[in-house]
Amino acid sequence: MSALLSAENLTIRIGPNAIVENVSLSFAPGRFVALIGPNGAGKTTLLKALAGLITTEGVVMFRDRPMDAIPGRERARCIAYLPQGHQVYWPLLARDVVALGRYPHGLADPSRLTADHARAIHSAMTRTDTTHLADQPVQTLSGGERARVMLARVMAVEAPVLLADEPTASLDPGHQISVMRDLKAESRRGTLVIAVTHDLGLAARLADEIVLLDRGRLIAQGSPDTVLTDENLHAVYQVSVLRQMIDGEMFLTPRAPL
Amino acid sequence: MSAGTGTEGAVAATGARPFPIVPVLAALVAILFLTSLAVGPVRLSIMEVARALVTPPGDAHRVIVLEIRLPRAILALAIGGMLGLAGASMQGLLRNPLAAPSLFGAPQAAAFAAVSTLSLGLNDALSWGLPLAAISGAFLSVFLLIAIAGRNASLLLLILAGLAVSSLAGAGTALAMNLASNPFAALEIAFWLLGSLEDRSMRHVMLCLPFIAVAALILFAQRGAFRALSLGEEAAASLGVPVERLRFLVILGVALGVGASVAVAGTIAFIGLIAPHLMRPLVRHDPARLLLPAALTGSALLLAADIAVRLIPASSDIKVGVLTSIIGVPFFLFLIVKQRKSLAGGIA
Protein backbone atom coordinates (compact mmCIF):
# COMPACT_ATOMS: atom_id res chain seq x y z
CA MET A 1 0.00 0.00 0.00
CA SER A 2 1.68 3.19 -1.16
CA ALA A 3 1.12 6.21 1.04
CA LEU A 4 -0.52 9.30 -0.44
CA LEU A 5 0.00 11.39 2.66
CA SER A 6 2.26 10.60 5.58
CA ALA A 7 3.83 12.16 8.62
CA GLU A 8 7.04 11.12 10.26
CA ASN A 9 8.00 11.95 13.84
CA LEU A 10 5.81 15.01 13.76
CA THR A 11 6.18 17.36 16.72
CA ILE A 12 4.44 20.72 16.84
CA ARG A 13 5.18 23.23 19.55
CA ILE A 14 3.32 26.40 20.42
CA GLY A 15 5.62 28.21 22.80
CA PRO A 16 7.23 25.66 25.13
CA ASN A 17 4.32 23.21 24.90
CA ALA A 18 4.26 20.34 22.45
CA ILE A 19 0.71 20.25 21.07
CA VAL A 20 1.49 17.22 18.93
CA GLU A 21 4.34 14.95 19.96
CA ASN A 22 6.24 12.49 17.85
CA VAL A 23 3.32 11.35 15.69
CA SER A 24 3.93 9.12 12.68
CA LEU A 25 1.04 8.32 10.35
CA SER A 26 0.49 7.13 6.84
CA PHE A 27 -2.61 7.23 4.64
CA ALA A 28 -3.54 5.51 1.39
CA PRO A 29 -5.74 7.03 -1.36
CA GLY A 30 -9.50 6.41 -1.33
CA ARG A 31 -9.79 5.98 2.44
CA PHE A 32 -12.24 7.69 4.75
CA VAL A 33 -10.37 8.42 7.96
CA ALA A 34 -11.92 9.73 11.17
CA LEU A 35 -9.53 11.67 13.39
CA ILE A 36 -10.85 11.47 16.94
CA GLY A 37 -9.75 12.36 20.43
CA PRO A 38 -10.84 14.48 23.38
CA ASN A 39 -10.86 18.29 23.32
CA GLY A 40 -7.31 19.59 23.35
CA ALA A 41 -5.86 16.35 21.99
CA GLY A 42 -4.19 18.21 19.11
CA LYS A 43 -6.53 17.10 16.33
CA THR A 44 -6.88 20.51 14.69
CA THR A 45 -3.16 21.19 14.96
CA LEU A 46 -2.34 17.83 13.41
CA LEU A 47 -4.81 18.44 10.59
CA LYS A 48 -3.28 21.85 9.85
CA ALA A 49 0.16 20.28 9.77
CA LEU A 50 -1.08 17.63 7.33
CA ALA A 51 -2.48 20.49 5.22
CA GLY A 52 0.96 22.10 5.18
CA LEU A 53 -0.32 25.23 6.92
CA ILE A 54 2.02 25.24 9.92
CA THR A 55 5.68 24.55 10.40
CA THR A 56 6.59 21.42 12.28
CA GLU A 57 9.47 19.35 13.50
CA GLY A 58 9.51 16.15 11.51
CA VAL A 59 8.27 15.75 7.96
CA VAL A 60 4.90 15.66 6.24
CA MET A 61 5.12 13.95 2.87
CA PHE A 62 2.68 14.22 -0.02
CA ARG A 63 3.39 11.29 -2.34
CA ASP A 64 7.19 11.37 -2.41
CA ARG A 65 7.67 15.04 -1.69
CA PRO A 66 8.15 16.88 1.60
CA MET A 67 5.21 19.24 2.03
CA ASP A 68 7.30 22.35 2.62
CA ALA A 69 9.01 21.83 -0.73
CA ILE A 70 5.70 22.17 -2.59
CA PRO A 71 4.84 25.76 -3.66
CA GLY A 72 1.62 27.22 -2.21
CA ARG A 73 -0.58 27.08 -5.30
CA GLU A 74 0.44 23.54 -6.13
CA ARG A 75 -0.04 22.41 -2.55
CA ALA A 76 -3.50 23.94 -2.66
CA ARG A 77 -4.35 21.75 -5.66
CA CYS A 78 -3.11 18.65 -3.81
CA ILE A 79 -4.78 19.21 -0.46
CA ALA A 80 -8.19 20.75 0.15
CA TYR A 81 -8.73 21.98 3.68
CA LEU A 82 -12.00 22.86 5.38
CA PRO A 83 -11.42 24.80 8.62
CA GLN A 84 -13.71 24.71 11.62
CA GLY A 85 -16.59 27.11 11.94
CA HIS A 86 -17.57 27.56 8.27
CA GLN A 87 -17.05 31.27 8.50
CA VAL A 88 -17.63 33.56 5.51
CA TYR A 89 -16.91 37.21 6.19
CA TRP A 90 -18.95 38.81 3.40
CA PRO A 91 -22.45 37.82 2.27
CA LEU A 92 -21.18 36.17 -0.92
CA LEU A 93 -23.51 34.05 -3.01
CA ALA A 94 -23.21 30.31 -2.35
CA ARG A 95 -22.02 29.71 -5.92
CA ASP A 96 -19.23 32.30 -5.53
CA VAL A 97 -18.12 30.59 -2.32
CA VAL A 98 -17.99 27.21 -4.04
CA ALA A 99 -16.14 28.81 -6.95
CA LEU A 100 -13.35 29.76 -4.52
CA GLY A 101 -12.45 26.08 -4.56
CA ARG A 102 -11.21 26.71 -8.11
CA TYR A 103 -8.85 29.50 -7.00
CA PRO A 104 -5.83 27.14 -6.83
CA HIS A 105 -6.62 26.16 -10.43
CA GLY A 106 -6.36 29.76 -11.55
CA LEU A 107 -9.99 30.89 -11.49
CA ALA A 108 -9.63 34.63 -11.05
CA ASP A 109 -13.18 35.79 -11.69
CA PRO A 110 -16.14 33.55 -10.81
CA SER A 111 -18.27 35.38 -13.35
CA ARG A 112 -16.08 34.01 -16.16
CA LEU A 113 -15.99 30.25 -15.71
CA THR A 114 -14.30 27.95 -18.18
CA ALA A 115 -16.08 24.69 -18.93
CA ASP A 116 -13.78 22.80 -16.58
CA HIS A 117 -14.38 25.15 -13.66
CA ALA A 118 -18.13 25.09 -14.29
CA ARG A 119 -18.11 21.29 -14.38
CA ALA A 120 -16.16 21.00 -11.09
CA ILE A 121 -18.40 23.52 -9.34
CA HIS A 122 -21.57 21.92 -10.65
CA SER A 123 -20.37 18.45 -9.71
CA ALA A 124 -19.47 19.51 -6.17
CA MET A 125 -22.79 21.28 -5.68
CA THR A 126 -24.73 18.32 -7.03
CA ARG A 127 -22.97 15.87 -4.73
CA THR A 128 -23.67 18.03 -1.69
CA ASP A 129 -27.22 18.77 -2.83
CA THR A 130 -26.67 22.54 -2.85
CA THR A 131 -27.45 23.54 -6.45
CA HIS A 132 -30.76 25.09 -5.35
CA LEU A 133 -28.86 27.35 -2.93
CA ALA A 134 -26.52 28.74 -5.59
CA ASP A 135 -28.05 32.21 -5.75
CA GLN A 136 -28.47 32.77 -2.04
CA PRO A 137 -26.04 34.78 0.10
CA VAL A 138 -24.36 32.34 2.49
CA GLN A 139 -25.31 34.51 5.47
CA THR A 140 -28.97 33.70 4.87
CA LEU A 141 -28.44 29.92 4.86
CA SER A 142 -29.13 27.66 7.83
CA GLY A 143 -26.19 26.06 9.63
CA GLY A 144 -26.74 22.77 7.84
CA GLU A 145 -27.06 24.39 4.40
CA ARG A 146 -23.96 26.44 5.01
CA ALA A 147 -21.99 23.36 6.11
CA ARG A 148 -22.95 21.65 2.84
CA VAL A 149 -21.99 24.70 0.76
CA MET A 150 -18.62 24.82 2.50
CA LEU A 151 -18.21 21.12 1.82
CA ALA A 152 -18.95 21.78 -1.85
CA ARG A 153 -16.25 24.46 -1.75
CA VAL A 154 -13.55 21.99 -0.67
CA MET A 155 -14.84 19.32 -3.04
CA ALA A 156 -14.63 21.76 -5.95
CA VAL A 157 -10.85 21.83 -5.47
CA GLU A 158 -10.86 18.21 -6.68
CA ALA A 159 -7.69 17.55 -4.74
CA PRO A 160 -6.49 14.00 -4.04
CA VAL A 161 -6.64 14.80 -0.31
CA LEU A 162 -9.54 16.42 1.54
CA LEU A 163 -9.07 17.44 5.18
CA ALA A 164 -12.13 18.57 7.14
CA ASP A 165 -12.00 19.95 10.67
CA GLU A 166 -15.20 19.11 12.54
CA PRO A 167 -17.41 19.39 9.46
CA THR A 168 -20.46 18.29 11.48
CA ALA A 169 -20.02 20.52 14.54
CA SER A 170 -23.28 22.15 15.66
CA LEU A 171 -25.34 20.41 12.99
CA ASP A 172 -28.62 18.56 13.60
CA PRO A 173 -28.47 14.75 13.37
CA GLY A 174 -29.86 14.69 9.83
CA HIS A 175 -27.20 17.09 8.55
CA GLN A 176 -24.47 15.32 10.51
CA ILE A 177 -25.31 12.12 8.71
CA SER A 178 -25.63 13.75 5.28
CA VAL A 179 -22.29 15.56 5.60
CA MET A 180 -20.47 12.41 6.76
CA ARG A 181 -22.14 10.40 4.00
CA ASP A 182 -21.03 12.98 1.39
CA LEU A 183 -17.47 12.75 2.73
CA LYS A 184 -17.57 8.97 2.54
CA ALA A 185 -18.86 9.17 -1.04
CA GLU A 186 -16.00 11.54 -1.86
CA SER A 187 -13.51 8.96 -0.57
CA ARG A 188 -15.10 6.37 -2.86
CA ARG A 189 -14.13 8.56 -5.80
CA GLY A 190 -10.51 7.94 -4.83
CA THR A 191 -9.94 10.92 -2.55
CA LEU A 192 -8.22 10.47 0.78
CA VAL A 193 -10.67 12.07 3.24
CA ILE A 194 -9.61 12.82 6.80
CA ALA A 195 -12.29 14.32 9.03
CA VAL A 196 -12.01 15.41 12.64
CA THR A 197 -15.14 14.37 14.52
CA HIS A 198 -16.49 13.82 18.00
CA ASP A 199 -19.25 11.52 16.79
CA LEU A 200 -17.92 8.08 17.67
CA GLY A 201 -21.09 6.41 16.43
CA LEU A 202 -20.85 7.85 12.92
CA ALA A 203 -17.10 7.30 12.87
CA ALA A 204 -17.63 3.63 13.75
CA ARG A 205 -20.25 3.21 11.03
CA LEU A 206 -18.66 5.16 8.19
CA ALA A 207 -14.90 5.37 8.60
CA ASP A 208 -12.52 2.91 6.97
CA GLU A 209 -9.90 3.88 9.43
CA ILE A 210 -9.71 5.69 12.74
CA VAL A 211 -6.86 7.74 14.20
CA LEU A 212 -7.10 8.24 17.96
CA LEU A 213 -5.13 11.08 19.54
CA ASP A 214 -4.79 11.98 23.19
CA ARG A 215 -2.74 14.85 24.65
CA GLY A 216 -0.76 15.19 21.45
CA ARG A 217 0.17 11.55 21.20
CA LEU A 218 -1.01 8.94 18.76
CA ILE A 219 -2.86 6.23 20.69
CA ALA A 220 -3.96 4.08 17.78
CA GLN A 221 -4.47 4.02 14.01
CA GLY A 222 -6.45 1.26 12.34
CA SER A 223 -9.89 -0.10 11.54
CA PRO A 224 -12.80 0.96 13.78
CA ASP A 225 -12.85 -2.47 15.41
CA THR A 226 -9.24 -2.33 16.48
CA VAL A 227 -9.22 1.31 17.60
CA LEU A 228 -12.61 1.79 19.25
CA THR A 229 -11.97 -0.79 21.95
CA ASP A 230 -13.35 -0.47 25.46
CA GLU A 231 -9.85 0.00 26.85
CA ASN A 232 -8.90 2.76 24.41
CA LEU A 233 -12.15 4.68 24.82
CA HIS A 234 -12.07 4.43 28.58
CA ALA A 235 -8.45 5.51 28.75
CA VAL A 236 -9.00 8.51 26.49
CA TYR A 237 -12.56 9.70 27.10
CA GLN A 238 -13.28 8.11 30.51
CA VAL A 239 -16.49 6.61 29.14
CA SER A 240 -17.70 3.12 28.51
CA VAL A 241 -19.61 2.26 25.36
CA LEU A 242 -22.78 0.45 24.52
CA ARG A 243 -22.51 -1.62 21.34
CA GLN A 244 -25.50 -2.81 19.35
CA MET A 245 -25.50 -4.75 16.14
CA ILE A 246 -28.44 -3.77 13.93
CA ASP A 247 -28.80 -5.09 10.38
CA GLY A 248 -25.14 -6.02 10.32
CA GLU A 249 -24.03 -2.51 11.35
CA MET A 250 -22.33 -1.68 14.63
CA PHE A 251 -23.94 1.16 16.58
CA LEU A 252 -21.85 2.62 19.32
CA THR A 253 -23.10 4.89 22.10
CA PRO A 254 -20.84 6.44 24.76
CA ARG A 255 -21.98 5.87 28.34
CA ALA A 256 -21.01 7.50 31.60
CA PRO A 257 -22.86 7.91 34.90
CA LEU A 258 -25.09 11.01 34.87
CA MET B 1 -21.33 13.08 -13.41
CA SER B 2 -22.93 14.32 -16.58
CA ALA B 3 -25.95 16.22 -15.39
CA GLY B 4 -28.54 18.06 -17.42
CA THR B 5 -26.92 20.88 -19.34
CA GLY B 6 -29.75 23.11 -18.16
CA THR B 7 -28.62 23.21 -14.54
CA GLU B 8 -24.97 23.24 -15.53
CA GLY B 9 -25.70 26.29 -17.63
CA ALA B 10 -27.46 27.86 -14.69
CA VAL B 11 -24.42 27.41 -12.47
CA ALA B 12 -22.10 28.59 -15.21
CA ALA B 13 -24.06 31.75 -15.90
CA THR B 14 -22.95 33.34 -12.68
CA GLY B 15 -21.52 36.32 -14.40
CA ALA B 16 -24.44 38.38 -15.61
CA ARG B 17 -23.79 41.53 -13.69
CA PRO B 18 -26.94 42.91 -12.19
CA PHE B 19 -25.96 46.49 -12.99
CA PRO B 20 -23.33 47.97 -15.39
CA ILE B 21 -21.71 49.70 -12.51
CA VAL B 22 -18.28 50.54 -13.90
CA PRO B 23 -19.44 52.36 -17.07
CA VAL B 24 -22.01 54.36 -15.10
CA LEU B 25 -19.42 55.42 -12.53
CA ALA B 26 -16.88 56.23 -15.23
CA ALA B 27 -19.41 58.48 -16.94
CA LEU B 28 -20.20 60.18 -13.63
CA VAL B 29 -16.50 60.76 -12.96
CA ALA B 30 -16.04 62.20 -16.47
CA ILE B 31 -18.95 64.62 -15.98
CA LEU B 32 -17.65 65.72 -12.57
CA PHE B 33 -14.14 66.13 -14.00
CA LEU B 34 -15.41 68.48 -16.72
CA THR B 35 -17.58 70.32 -14.19
CA SER B 36 -14.54 70.77 -12.01
CA LEU B 37 -12.80 72.50 -14.91
CA ALA B 38 -15.78 74.82 -15.38
CA VAL B 39 -16.58 75.85 -11.81
CA GLY B 40 -14.82 78.59 -9.87
CA PRO B 41 -14.75 82.37 -9.52
CA VAL B 42 -14.89 82.53 -13.33
CA ARG B 43 -17.70 80.22 -14.37
CA LEU B 44 -17.27 78.63 -17.76
CA SER B 45 -19.65 76.55 -19.80
CA ILE B 46 -18.57 73.11 -20.98
CA MET B 47 -18.19 74.62 -24.48
CA GLU B 48 -15.92 77.34 -23.14
CA VAL B 49 -13.86 74.73 -21.34
CA ALA B 50 -13.48 72.76 -24.55
CA ARG B 51 -12.54 75.90 -26.46
CA ALA B 52 -10.00 76.90 -23.80
CA LEU B 53 -8.27 73.55 -24.25
CA VAL B 54 -7.58 74.18 -27.94
CA THR B 55 -6.89 77.94 -28.00
CA PRO B 56 -3.30 79.14 -28.29
CA PRO B 57 -1.31 80.01 -25.12
CA GLY B 58 -1.97 83.40 -23.60
CA ASP B 59 -5.74 83.16 -23.57
CA ALA B 60 -7.14 83.89 -20.11
CA HIS B 61 -9.59 81.01 -20.14
CA ARG B 62 -6.80 78.67 -21.17
CA VAL B 63 -4.70 79.75 -18.21
CA ILE B 64 -7.63 79.25 -15.84
CA VAL B 65 -8.54 75.84 -17.18
CA LEU B 66 -5.12 74.36 -17.86
CA GLU B 67 -2.99 75.86 -15.12
CA ILE B 68 -5.38 76.41 -12.25
CA ARG B 69 -8.24 73.96 -12.58
CA LEU B 70 -6.78 71.02 -14.48
CA PRO B 71 -4.16 70.10 -11.83
CA ARG B 72 -6.82 70.38 -9.17
CA ALA B 73 -9.22 68.13 -11.10
CA ILE B 74 -6.51 65.56 -11.85
CA LEU B 75 -5.50 65.49 -8.19
CA ALA B 76 -9.11 65.03 -7.07
CA LEU B 77 -9.50 62.21 -9.57
CA ALA B 78 -6.27 60.45 -8.60
CA ILE B 79 -6.35 61.03 -4.84
CA GLY B 80 -10.06 60.26 -4.48
CA GLY B 81 -9.55 57.09 -6.50
CA MET B 82 -6.53 56.14 -4.46
CA LEU B 83 -8.36 56.66 -1.17
CA GLY B 84 -11.34 54.61 -2.35
CA LEU B 85 -9.07 51.83 -3.57
CA ALA B 86 -7.01 51.89 -0.38
CA GLY B 87 -10.17 51.69 1.72
CA ALA B 88 -11.55 48.77 -0.28
CA SER B 89 -8.19 46.98 -0.03
CA MET B 90 -7.93 47.47 3.72
CA GLN B 91 -11.50 46.30 4.19
CA GLY B 92 -10.73 43.26 2.07
CA LEU B 93 -7.58 42.49 4.02
CA LEU B 94 -9.17 42.97 7.43
CA ARG B 95 -12.54 41.57 6.34
CA ASN B 96 -14.16 44.43 8.18
CA PRO B 97 -16.31 47.16 6.58
CA LEU B 98 -15.11 49.69 9.16
CA ALA B 99 -11.46 49.51 8.16
CA ALA B 100 -9.97 52.63 6.62
CA PRO B 101 -6.45 53.62 5.51
CA SER B 102 -6.03 55.77 8.59
CA LEU B 103 -6.35 52.58 10.65
CA PHE B 104 -2.72 51.69 9.99
CA GLY B 105 -1.51 55.17 10.80
CA ALA B 106 -0.05 55.84 7.35
CA PRO B 107 -1.79 59.18 6.64
CA GLN B 108 -1.14 60.43 10.16
CA ALA B 109 2.54 59.56 9.87
CA ALA B 110 2.72 61.22 6.46
CA ALA B 111 1.07 64.31 7.93
CA PHE B 112 3.50 64.33 10.85
CA ALA B 113 6.52 64.13 8.56
CA ALA B 114 5.17 66.90 6.37
CA VAL B 115 4.32 69.09 9.33
CA SER B 116 7.83 68.63 10.72
CA THR B 117 9.33 70.07 7.56
CA LEU B 118 6.85 72.97 7.67
CA SER B 119 7.66 73.75 11.28
CA LEU B 120 11.41 73.52 10.74
CA GLY B 121 11.04 75.93 7.83
CA LEU B 122 12.66 73.42 5.49
CA ASN B 123 9.79 73.83 3.11
CA ASP B 124 11.06 77.20 1.93
CA ALA B 125 14.58 75.94 1.37
CA LEU B 126 13.56 72.77 -0.45
CA SER B 127 10.36 73.05 -2.45
CA TRP B 128 10.16 69.27 -2.80
CA GLY B 129 10.91 68.77 0.87
CA LEU B 130 7.34 68.57 2.06
CA PRO B 131 6.01 65.93 -0.35
CA LEU B 132 9.14 63.80 -0.06
CA ALA B 133 8.91 63.93 3.73
CA ALA B 134 5.25 62.88 3.68
CA ILE B 135 5.97 59.88 1.49
CA SER B 136 8.87 58.84 3.71
CA GLY B 137 6.66 59.29 6.76
CA ALA B 138 4.09 56.90 5.33
CA PHE B 139 6.84 54.39 4.55
CA LEU B 140 8.30 54.73 8.01
CA SER B 141 4.93 54.11 9.61
CA VAL B 142 4.62 50.85 7.70
CA PHE B 143 8.01 49.65 8.84
CA LEU B 144 7.28 50.72 12.39
CA LEU B 145 3.96 48.93 12.23
CA ILE B 146 5.55 45.72 11.02
CA ALA B 147 8.29 46.01 13.63
CA ILE B 148 5.72 46.37 16.41
CA ALA B 149 3.24 43.79 15.20
CA GLY B 150 5.59 41.34 13.50
CA ARG B 151 4.94 39.91 10.06
CA ASN B 152 2.87 37.05 11.45
CA ALA B 153 0.68 39.38 13.43
CA SER B 154 -2.98 38.71 13.99
CA LEU B 155 -5.36 41.33 12.66
CA LEU B 156 -6.17 42.53 16.15
CA LEU B 157 -2.47 43.10 16.85
CA LEU B 158 -2.13 45.00 13.56
CA ILE B 159 -5.06 47.24 14.41
CA LEU B 160 -3.68 48.00 17.86
CA ALA B 161 -0.22 48.66 16.45
CA GLY B 162 -1.77 50.94 13.82
CA LEU B 163 -3.58 52.81 16.57
CA ALA B 164 -0.29 53.25 18.43
CA VAL B 165 1.48 54.48 15.31
CA SER B 166 -1.25 56.97 14.47
CA SER B 167 -1.39 58.23 18.06
CA LEU B 168 2.36 58.70 18.05
CA ALA B 169 2.14 60.58 14.76
CA GLY B 170 -0.68 62.73 16.17
CA ALA B 171 1.38 63.56 19.25
CA GLY B 172 4.36 64.39 17.04
CA THR B 173 2.19 66.68 14.93
CA ALA B 174 0.95 68.47 18.05
CA LEU B 175 4.53 68.88 19.24
CA ALA B 176 5.62 70.29 15.89
CA MET B 177 2.83 72.88 16.04
CA ASN B 178 3.65 73.61 19.65
CA LEU B 179 7.28 74.28 18.80
CA ALA B 180 6.58 76.11 15.56
CA SER B 181 9.02 78.96 15.08
CA ASN B 182 6.32 81.61 14.63
CA PRO B 183 2.52 81.93 14.57
CA PHE B 184 2.50 81.97 10.78
CA ALA B 185 4.20 78.60 10.63
CA ALA B 186 1.60 77.20 13.06
CA LEU B 187 -1.19 78.66 10.93
CA GLU B 188 0.35 77.24 7.79
CA ILE B 189 0.49 73.80 9.40
CA ALA B 190 -3.09 74.06 10.62
CA PHE B 191 -4.40 74.98 7.17
CA TRP B 192 -2.35 72.32 5.48
CA LEU B 193 -3.65 69.68 7.88
CA LEU B 194 -7.22 70.55 6.93
CA GLY B 195 -6.71 69.06 3.49
CA SER B 196 -7.17 71.02 0.30
CA LEU B 197 -6.67 70.86 -3.45
CA GLU B 198 -6.48 74.60 -3.98
CA ASP B 199 -3.54 76.23 -5.74
CA ARG B 200 -1.92 73.00 -6.80
CA SER B 201 0.16 72.87 -9.96
CA MET B 202 1.22 70.23 -12.45
CA ARG B 203 4.36 69.85 -10.34
CA HIS B 204 2.21 68.41 -7.54
CA VAL B 205 0.47 66.15 -10.03
CA MET B 206 3.76 64.82 -11.37
CA LEU B 207 5.02 64.26 -7.87
CA CYS B 208 2.20 62.09 -6.57
CA LEU B 209 0.94 60.42 -9.74
CA PRO B 210 3.76 57.87 -10.18
CA PHE B 211 3.43 56.70 -6.57
CA ILE B 212 -0.34 56.46 -6.86
CA ALA B 213 -0.01 54.49 -10.11
CA VAL B 214 2.38 51.98 -8.54
CA ALA B 215 0.20 51.68 -5.44
CA ALA B 216 -2.90 51.09 -7.59
CA LEU B 217 -1.11 48.35 -9.54
CA ILE B 218 0.00 46.63 -6.34
CA LEU B 219 -3.46 46.76 -4.80
CA PHE B 220 -5.39 45.72 -7.92
CA ALA B 221 -3.11 42.70 -8.30
CA GLN B 222 -4.34 41.37 -4.94
CA ARG B 223 -8.03 41.25 -5.86
CA GLY B 224 -8.29 37.46 -6.23
CA ALA B 225 -6.62 37.04 -2.86
CA PHE B 226 -9.17 39.37 -1.26
CA ARG B 227 -11.96 37.14 -2.50
CA ALA B 228 -10.26 34.01 -1.13
CA LEU B 229 -9.74 35.85 2.14
CA SER B 230 -13.54 36.00 2.57
CA LEU B 231 -13.21 32.48 3.98
CA GLY B 232 -10.71 33.57 6.62
CA GLU B 233 -6.93 33.46 6.66
CA GLU B 234 -6.60 29.73 7.19
CA ALA B 235 -8.87 28.75 4.35
CA ALA B 236 -7.22 31.36 2.13
CA ALA B 237 -3.80 29.96 2.98
CA SER B 238 -5.06 26.46 2.17
CA LEU B 239 -6.16 27.81 -1.23
CA GLY B 240 -2.60 28.93 -1.90
CA VAL B 241 -2.84 32.61 -0.94
CA PRO B 242 0.48 33.71 0.61
CA VAL B 243 -1.28 35.51 3.44
CA GLU B 244 1.78 37.14 5.00
CA ARG B 245 3.02 38.47 1.68
CA LEU B 246 -0.48 39.72 0.86
CA ARG B 247 -0.64 41.62 4.13
CA PHE B 248 2.74 43.19 3.48
CA LEU B 249 1.84 44.20 -0.09
CA VAL B 250 -1.45 45.77 0.95
CA ILE B 251 0.23 47.80 3.66
CA LEU B 252 2.94 48.84 1.21
CA GLY B 253 0.42 49.82 -1.46
CA VAL B 254 -1.66 51.79 1.02
CA ALA B 255 1.40 53.57 2.42
CA LEU B 256 2.65 54.52 -1.05
CA GLY B 257 -0.68 55.75 -2.34
CA VAL B 258 -1.95 57.43 0.79
CA GLY B 259 1.47 58.91 1.60
CA ALA B 260 1.70 60.48 -1.85
CA SER B 261 -1.87 61.75 -1.56
CA VAL B 262 -1.33 63.33 1.85
CA ALA B 263 1.86 64.87 0.55
CA VAL B 264 0.09 67.04 -1.99
CA ALA B 265 -3.38 67.44 -0.50
CA GLY B 266 -3.03 67.21 3.28
CA THR B 267 -5.32 64.83 5.14
CA ILE B 268 -8.61 64.09 3.42
CA ALA B 269 -10.58 61.70 5.58
CA PHE B 270 -13.43 59.24 5.16
CA ILE B 271 -13.43 58.85 1.35
CA GLY B 272 -11.70 55.51 1.90
CA LEU B 273 -14.43 54.44 4.29
CA ILE B 274 -17.49 55.70 2.42
CA ALA B 275 -16.66 54.80 -1.18
CA PRO B 276 -16.32 51.00 -0.71
CA HIS B 277 -19.33 50.93 1.54
CA LEU B 278 -21.57 52.59 -1.05
CA MET B 279 -20.49 50.16 -3.77
CA ARG B 280 -20.47 46.90 -1.82
CA PRO B 281 -24.15 45.96 -2.27
CA LEU B 282 -23.89 46.69 -6.01
CA VAL B 283 -21.09 44.14 -6.51
CA ARG B 284 -22.81 41.44 -4.43
CA HIS B 285 -20.34 42.08 -1.59
CA ASP B 286 -17.50 40.56 -3.60
CA PRO B 287 -14.30 42.13 -2.20
CA ALA B 288 -12.50 41.58 -5.52
CA ARG B 289 -15.13 43.12 -7.76
CA LEU B 290 -15.37 46.00 -5.28
CA LEU B 291 -11.95 47.53 -6.01
CA LEU B 292 -12.60 49.35 -9.29
CA PRO B 293 -16.06 50.73 -8.39
CA ALA B 294 -14.73 51.85 -4.99
CA ALA B 295 -11.86 53.70 -6.70
CA LEU B 296 -14.22 55.38 -9.17
CA THR B 297 -16.61 56.32 -6.37
CA GLY B 298 -13.70 57.79 -4.42
CA SER B 299 -12.80 59.91 -7.43
CA ALA B 300 -16.41 61.02 -7.86
CA LEU B 301 -16.78 61.88 -4.16
CA LEU B 302 -13.60 63.95 -4.01
CA LEU B 303 -14.34 65.71 -7.31
CA ALA B 304 -17.85 66.49 -6.05
CA ALA B 305 -16.58 67.70 -2.67
CA ASP B 306 -13.96 69.86 -4.34
CA ILE B 307 -16.64 71.38 -6.59
CA ALA B 308 -18.90 71.90 -3.58
CA VAL B 309 -16.30 73.90 -1.62
CA ARG B 310 -16.08 76.29 -4.57
CA LEU B 311 -19.86 76.73 -4.65
CA ILE B 312 -20.62 77.02 -0.91
CA PRO B 313 -20.89 80.72 -0.08
CA ALA B 314 -18.64 81.37 2.92
CA SER B 315 -16.62 84.30 4.16
CA SER B 316 -13.43 82.26 3.95
CA ASP B 317 -12.78 79.14 1.87
CA ILE B 318 -14.04 75.84 3.25
CA LYS B 319 -11.28 73.25 2.87
CA VAL B 320 -12.26 70.07 1.08
CA GLY B 321 -10.82 67.91 3.88
CA VAL B 322 -13.13 69.65 6.35
CA LEU B 323 -16.14 68.99 4.13
CA THR B 324 -15.38 65.28 3.73
CA SER B 325 -14.96 64.97 7.50
CA ILE B 326 -18.23 66.74 8.23
CA ILE B 327 -20.04 64.37 5.90
CA GLY B 328 -17.89 61.37 6.80
CA VAL B 329 -18.06 61.29 10.58
CA PRO B 330 -21.85 60.91 10.84
CA PHE B 331 -21.59 58.21 8.17
CA PHE B 332 -18.89 56.44 10.20
CA LEU B 333 -21.13 56.54 13.30
CA PHE B 334 -24.02 55.19 11.27
CA LEU B 335 -21.82 52.30 10.14
CA ILE B 336 -20.70 51.55 13.70
CA VAL B 337 -24.31 51.46 14.91
CA LYS B 338 -25.24 49.20 12.00
CA GLN B 339 -22.32 46.89 12.74
CA ARG B 340 -22.74 47.00 16.50
CA LYS B 341 -23.92 43.45 16.84
CA SER B 342 -21.08 41.88 14.86
CA LEU B 343 -18.45 44.19 16.37
CA ALA B 344 -19.45 43.12 19.87
CA GLY B 345 -18.13 39.71 18.93
CA GLY B 346 -14.66 41.15 18.48
CA ILE B 347 -12.26 40.93 15.59
CA ALA B 348 -10.96 37.48 14.84
Image: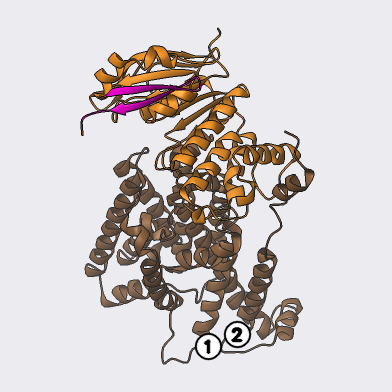
Chain colours: A orange, B brown
Measured as percent of width and height from the top left, residue A223 is found at: 45, 14
Residue that label 2 marks = B39
Residue occupying image coordinates x 55% and y 14%: A63
Across and down, in percent, residue B192 comes to: 39, 72
Q: Quadrant of residue A122?
A: top right
Q: In front: A241, or B146?
A: A241
Callout 1: SS: helix
For disc 1, the chain is: B
What residue sits right under mark 1 in the picture?
A: B311
Crowdedness of circle 1 by 10 Å Cα count: few (<14), some, many (20+)?
some
What span is in magenta? A240-257
Q: Can I make out residue B243 in this image?
A: no
Q: Position of residue A191 (x, y in %)?
A: 58, 23
Give how far apart the Cα atoms at labels 1 and 2 are. 8 Å
Q: Residue at x 51, y 53 (%)?
A: A141
Label 2 amino acid? Answer: Val
Q: Is residue B206 above or below residue A235?
A: below
Q: Say whether residue B292 is left or right of residue A40.
A: right
For the residue pair B9 and B117, the one nearer the viewer reads as B9
Q: Is residue A203 above or below residue B10?
A: above
Q: Is residue B260 above or below residue A251?
A: below
Magenta segment, principal secondary structure?
Answer: strand
Front position in the image: A20 or A148: A148
Image quadrant containing the N terminus of chain A: top right
User: Looking at the rendering, in which quadrant would you find the C terminus of chain A?
Assistant: top left
Task: Relative to B71, say whether B168 is above or below.
Answer: above
Instruction: Give the percent coordinates (x, y) of residue B52.
Output: 71, 81
Q: Amino acid at mark 1?
A: Leu
Residue projecting furthest to the top:
A1
Q: Residue at x 53, y 42 (%)?
A: A148
